[in-house]
């Protein structure tokens, strides 16, 4: 049994992600159930629930726009990105924030840091047989980092076009 845990220690990370994801979904379910119970309480008393309470039903990370509108169909005048007009705000999000140079440079630094970690691990790890695997991953991540660097330079140079 000890060999199993020493050979498959890395499985703790995906299993932990699944456990925390399930916990998050359970809490979201309880939150939406309590929300609907509160709406049911208003309906049983014959009172009109506050508009904020009714609007909050579709806001729980389920892909809907605020107010229960379907995805992409916002009410007139609603600006989801804070740019003043919804049409222009969505366009600015698509063309600047999502594809802007900030995200490209961020990708360079993140993949570069992970590549540096694998280079360090390939040289200094004291695990038998780990040199080849770490070295291969470090080479691949270095190539990905160089590609991200090229795209970041291009995104910074041709930003306004």
Image (cartoon, helix red, strand yellow):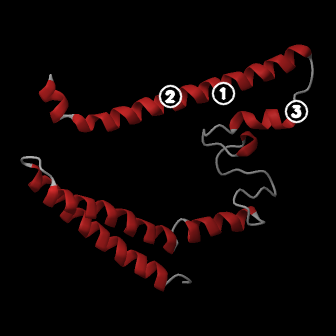
The vertical placement of 62 against 124, above or below, is: above
Q: Which mark is residue 156?
A: none
User: Where residue 156 sits: x, y (%)?
Assistant: 48, 81
How many marks the image carries: the answer is 3
Quarter of the image with the C terminus in it: bottom right
User: Where residue 70 sits: x, y (%)?
Assistant: 67, 43
Residue beneath label 1, please? Answer: 31
First in residue order: circle 1 vs circle 3: 1
Name the residue at 75% across, 58% down: 79
Quadrant in the rendering for residue 6? top left
Instruction: Work out whether residue 21 or residue 64 is closer to the camera in this orientation and state it.
Output: 21
Residue beneath label 3, please? Answer: 50
Name the residue at 33% across, 38% down: 13
Residue at mark 1 to residue at mark 3: CA–CA distance: 18 Å
User: Where residue 151 sits: x, y (%)?
Assistant: 39, 75
Residue at mark 1 to residue at mark 2: CA–CA distance: 12 Å
Left or right: 21 as drawn, with respect to 3:
right
């Amino acid at each position: 049994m000890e060999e199993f845990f020493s050979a498959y220690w890395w499985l703790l990370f995906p299993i932990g992600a699944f456990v925390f994801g399930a916990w998050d979904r359970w809490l979201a379910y309880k939150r939406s159930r309590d929300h609907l119970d509160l709406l049911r309480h208003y309906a049983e008393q014959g009172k009109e629930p506050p508009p904020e309470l009714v609007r909050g039903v579709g806001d729980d990370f389920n892909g809907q726009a605020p107010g229960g509108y379907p995805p992409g169909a916002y009410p007139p005048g609603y600006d989801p990105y804070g740019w003043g007009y919804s049409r222009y705000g969505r366009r600015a999000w698509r063309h600047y924030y999502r594809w802007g140079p900030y995200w490209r440079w961020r990708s360079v630094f993140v993949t570069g840091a992970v590549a540096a970690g694998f280079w360090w691990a390939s040289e200094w790890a004291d695990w038998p047989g780990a040199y080849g695997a770490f070295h291969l991953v470090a080479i691949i991540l270095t190539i990905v980092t160089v590609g991200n660097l090229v795209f970041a330079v291009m995104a910074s140079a041709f930003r306004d076009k």
